[in-house]
Image (cartoon, rainbow, N blue to C red):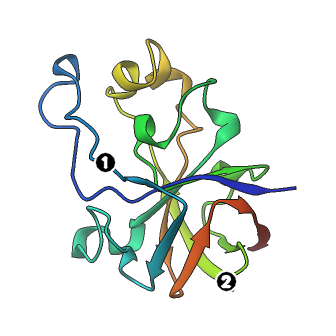
Amino acid sequence: MPEIVQLLASPVHRYVGRPADGPLPAPVGELVEEIRIRAGLGVVGDRYFGRPAHREASVTVIARESLPGGAGLVEVRRNIMVAGIAVDDLVGAVLTLDSGDGPVRLRVRRAAHPCAWMDVTVGPGAWKALRGKGGVRCEPLDDGILRVGPVTVTVQR
């Protein structure tokens, strides 16, 4: 059964400068049990919420199956980690997630390409290993809440 494994709403941009310098410390509370999504704006409390340049890509989703053991959202800086959903294959589709509070539709706009920071935060070689498996950037079409746990999934192509 598909599930939402982790959720992240980070108010700060931690990847500043060169990857060799390492990221800024993670703020307390950026991993959460639920997130509130606003149509056209993104994840409430996230660093990209409401930013015009990110409105069509303000929610990021990655599959747990793409990551090595022990890596999570703090390392890859995506908003939603799912299991049992091949999200990298969904560009152009509408992904609907319902974790019990009603459906939230996400238009999958494009791939979320990994960057050189992945070699620092996930481990050496992660940047190359995550190419084509770095998740997707989505435009939220509905207001709603997503929670960690089982999720009902619908894909409309």
Residue at (22, 38) in percent of width and height: 15
Looking at the rendering, which quadrant does residue 61 occupy?
bottom right
| Residue type of the residue flagged with mark 1 | Val
The disc label shown at residue 28, or none: 1
Measuring from the top left, give residue 126's x and y in whole percent.
48, 21
Q: Is residue 122 above or below residue 81?
A: above
Q: Secondary structure at mark 2?
A: loop
| Residue type of the residue flagged with mark 2 | Asp
The disc label shown at residue 101, or none: 2
| Image quadrant containing the C terminus | bottom right
Mark 2 surroundings: few (<14), some (14-19) or many (≥20) residues within 10 A: few
For this orientation, the residue located farthest to the front is 28
The residue lying toward the viewer, choosing from 100 and 154, is: 100
Q: Is residue 104 above or below residue 112?
A: below
| Image quadrant containing the N terminus | bottom right
Residue at (36, 33) in percent of width and height: 115
